[in-house]
Amino acid sequence: MKTLQFRNNDEMPILGLGTFRSEPNEVYASVYEAIKIGYRHIDCASVYGNEKEVGNAIADAIKEGIVTREDLWITSKLWSDSHGRENVIPALQNTLNDLQLEYLDLYLIHWPIAFKKGVEFPKTAEEFIPLEDKPLTDTWKGLEDALEQGLTKHIGMSNFNQNHLIDIIDHTKHLPEMLQVEVHPFLQQSELLEFAKAHRIHMTAYAPIGSGANDDDDLNLLKNKTINDIATANSMTAAQVLLAWDIQRGVSVIPKSVNPKRLQENFDTIHFELQEDDMKRIEALDKHHRFIDGTFWEVENGPYTADSIWNA
């Protein structure tokens, strides 16, 4: 499988399994089956509420000799109630305990949003903490501490915009190596991708085939005529076309599925390659449309807006 190489020559499989919205009673079977199929990259987060089941699946796969720990690339993310240097390692230790691991391969700040300890998801302005009071650079120092203590091998961020990245880069001891954001043909993020590449920051695409049920066929990537025409011409599924497009741009993909057939189909994308003309046809599909638009962070008199997350 194609990999993304990090500064210390570690390599991350470019195609992984996402676990967002995988129910706890489904995610064990999904992760275990994925590892059996050949997936070696699993993307997790504490807020998904399923890391214990993910950890059980990983532990059983290792115990049964399907893989070793060293074969796997495991990513997780710091939730927003644990911003601040002093909170990072305790939060990471909880994740490691749930995943039954001694270290992560990659740890990300999940959102450039801070709120009070113990709040799972804020509903009022008072539950948030403005970044002026809890700077991202301070939280980043906590990730650097975790890196230096060997609790994670690499650090990065998720849902950060270019200005957030510049702020971290300008005040860092250890440069970020990964940015995870929504990327698909309707939100191509080309400018952000070029900026990341210029700073040797890899990019991972979440929602690479869309996100959840969508009643609007114009916003359904799997029903898009161009995508399906390319799929038919290349004997691929629409999902495989979408994943191959990101992979050929050098972007890692982490599609989520709990369906064994789709797990296999997604994994088989590694055997396909799109033609240059196919890539150009897909390039013309950009709508700058976000499925995960960030408006759920907006509350009356709150310190965050969707626009400030993506553009400030």
Image (tube, rainbow, N blue to C red):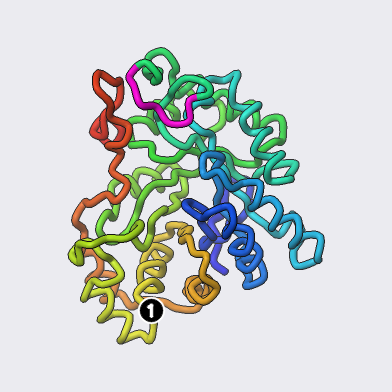
Is residue 226 within the magenta segment?
Answer: no
Q: Does residue 284 appear anywhere in the picture? A: no
The x and y percentages for residue 166 are 38, 30
* Residue 124 lies within the magenta run: yes
Give the residue type that dot 1 points to.
Thr
- Hey, which residue is sitting farthest top in the picture? 133
> In the image, what residue occupies the spot 26% across and 72% down?
223
Residue ranking furthest to the front: 25
* Residue 23 in the figure: left or right of residue 61: left
Residue 66 is situated, as x and y percent measured from the top left of the image, at 75, 67
Q: Main secondary structure of the magenta part?
A: loop
In magenta, the rendered stretch is: 119-125
Q: Which residue is mark 1?
A: 237
Q: Residue at x 46, y 61 (%)?
A: 255
Dividing the picture into quadrants, the one containing residue 233 is: bottom left
In which quadrant of the rendered view does residue 237 lie? bottom left
Q: Is residue 76 left or right of residue 36?
A: left
Q: How many marks?
A: 1
Q: Residue 306, how many percent across, how many down?
A: 26, 34
Query: Residue at the location (66% across, 46% down)?
Result: 52
Question: Which quadrant is the C terminus positioned in?
Answer: top left
Q: Is residue 304 left or right of residue 113?
A: left
Work out whether 213 lies above or below 164. below
User: At numbered mark 1, what does the secondary structure look like: helix, strand or loop?
Assistant: loop
